[in-house]
């Protein structure tokens, strides 16, 4: 059995980590992780054949020669290696978690800091017990910051990720009702997310907080903080929306950092992104990024992965926010869309997944918001939960059913909002809306 110190010596020689036996670049280490349906040990030989220098395994029977590194548990070894490596690096780690907006906030912060520093950040949404260590293992001596996104759907997960990443700074974007199957309640969500604050409090870290969120302010007590807020003179950075067309333009200023009002036109749709933008601003100012560079970074950021994306096609204007959905983010997206000055509007919503016992009630609440508070020309609902509700709107059990409808009834000269959980697959209908 190899210990972490000896494994680290090998990693320093061959620092490219892979968990896919089909993709083994030169000087790589293959970690034979177990999945729901696959045992990585079975693919160790293939990984070596495909170019890996060593294979880290936890089944001694697989070890055919000294290129197989046997450990008690592959996942644990990878996490311990990542934690050990993080301790050797000088980069300051900023952890980002929250119910909504954490991926956008992470990317905005990284974009701002990259104007002045060498920054490593979480790719896509690799924010779990596998993705976080994989990200940390990409740290180099040149990196000055690591911006690490942390996701969770059960209590204790953020605490475990903090033990691996050992953050110096942290942000919780917000608390919302998501993944209630794992958290049990909204209070459970708060308890789980604030494991980040608990770690930073214990390790004398600092936090960036939204001063307008009373729950966050309360949970951040006892930790040094730098604040941001919407139209809040008490915040270290304050800002407000100056326009939506449909991407938002914002104004921000800072008394603490002696910055007068700045104007930024973004490529982000949705007023709810203002808080994410202000978080990036306050982080940038705290680490002495020049205001002009901050503005340039925010202006140049273009969202991907179907998060707050605006797409103008030959026939329609699409607002695509179909990577994640929960009651708070869906309600915010709907109200924002309703406020936009389009003459013809269509909403296409997919089920919100992992809502637990309140799933039907949560979907009924969204339907009631549309019916009683909004003015939308056409509403299409897709997914088993929405289809089970007597909503009065057109419903489809599957995206294929919805695609067939849109192919036969293509919208034209219409603004369309797409919002739903990633597992529903709403991105597959974009082709029928162009």
Image (cartoon, rainbow, N blue to C red):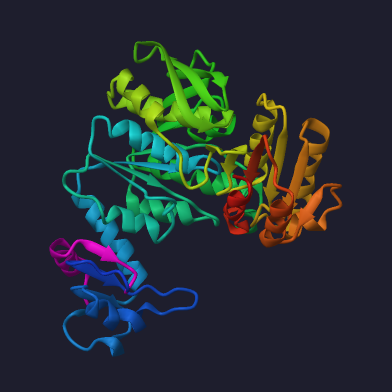
- Tell which of 120 and 316 is nearer to you: 316
Drawn side of residue 224 relative to residue 427, left or right: left
- Tell which of 97 and 183 is nearer to you: 97
Rendered position, 408 above or below 301? below
Q: Position of residue 401 (x, y in %)?
A: 72, 60
Residue name at image x 68 percent, y 36 percent: 334
Quarter holding residue 24: bottom left
Task: Name the quarter where the C terminus is drawn.
Answer: top right
Quarter holding residue 255: top left
Whether residue 121 is visible:
yes
Residue range of the region highlighted in magenta in the rendering: 1-21
Residue name at image x 67 percent, y 61 percent: 400
Residue 10 belongs to magenta span: yes
Residue name at image x 33 percent, y 58 percent: 133
Task: Name the quarter where the N terminus is drawn.
Answer: bottom left
Whether residue 225 is visible:
no
Rendered position, 107 above or below 400? above
Q: Position of residue 370 (x, y in %)?
A: 78, 37
- Tell which of 244 and 260 is nearer to you: 244
Drawn side of residue 3 relative to residue 188, left or right: left
Quarter holding residue 174: top right
Q: Position of residue 205 (x, y in %)?
A: 35, 37
């Amino acid at each position: 059995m190899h210990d972490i110190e000896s494994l680290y010596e090998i990693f320093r020689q061959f620092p490219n980590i892979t968990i896919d036996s089909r993709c083994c670049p030169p000087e790589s280490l293959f970690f034979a992780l177990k999945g729901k349906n696959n045992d990585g040990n079975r693919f160790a030989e293939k990984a070596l054949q495909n170019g890996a220098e060593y294979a880290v395994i936890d089944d001694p029977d697989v070890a055919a020669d000294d290129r197989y590194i046997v450990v008690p548990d592959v996942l644990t070894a990878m996490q311990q290696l990542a934690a050990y490596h993080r301790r050797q690096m000088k980069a300051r780690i900023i952890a980002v978690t929250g119910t909504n907006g954490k991926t956008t906030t992470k990317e905005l912060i990284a974009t701002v800091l990259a104007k002045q520093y060498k920054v490593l950040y979480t790719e896509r949404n690799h924010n779990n017990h596998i993705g976080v260590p994989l990200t940390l293992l990409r740290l180099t001596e040149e990196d000055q910051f690591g911006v690490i996104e942390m996701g969770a759907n059960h209590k204790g997960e953020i605490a475990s990720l903090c033990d691996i990443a050992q953050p110096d700074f942290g942000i919780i974007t917000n608390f919302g009702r998501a993944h209630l199957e794992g958290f049990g309640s909204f209070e459970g969500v708060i308890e789980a997310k604030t494991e980040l604050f608990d770690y930073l409090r214990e390790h004398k870290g600092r936090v960036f907080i939204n001063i307008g969120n009373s729950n966050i302010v309360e949970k951040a007590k006892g930790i040094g903080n730098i604040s941001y807020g919407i139209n809040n003179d008490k915040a270290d950075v304050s800002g407000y929306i100056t326009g939506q067309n449909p991407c938002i333009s914002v104004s921000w200023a800072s008394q603490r950092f002696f910055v007068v009002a700045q104007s930024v036109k973004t490529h982000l749709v949705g007023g709810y992104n203002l808080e994410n933008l202000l978080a990036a601003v306050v982080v940038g100012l705290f680490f002495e990024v020049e205001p002009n560079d901050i503005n340039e970074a925010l202006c140049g950021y273009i969202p991907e992965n179907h998060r707050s994306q605006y797409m103008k096609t030959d026939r329609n204007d699409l607002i695509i926010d179909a990577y994640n959905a929960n009651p708070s983010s869906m309600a915010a997206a709907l109200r924002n869309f309703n406020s936009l000055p389009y003459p013809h509007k269509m909403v296409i919503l997919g089920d919100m997944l992992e809502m637990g016992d309140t799933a039907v009630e949560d979907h009924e609440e969204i339907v009631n918001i549309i019916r009683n508070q909004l003015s939308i020309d056409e509403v299409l609902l897709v997914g088993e939960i929405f289809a089970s509700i007597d909503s009065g709107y057109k419903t489809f059990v599957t995206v294929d059913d919805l695609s067939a409808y849109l192919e036969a009834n293509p919208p034209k000269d219409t603004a369309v909002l797409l919002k739903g959980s990633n597992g529903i697959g709403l991105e597959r209908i974009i082709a029928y809306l162009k």
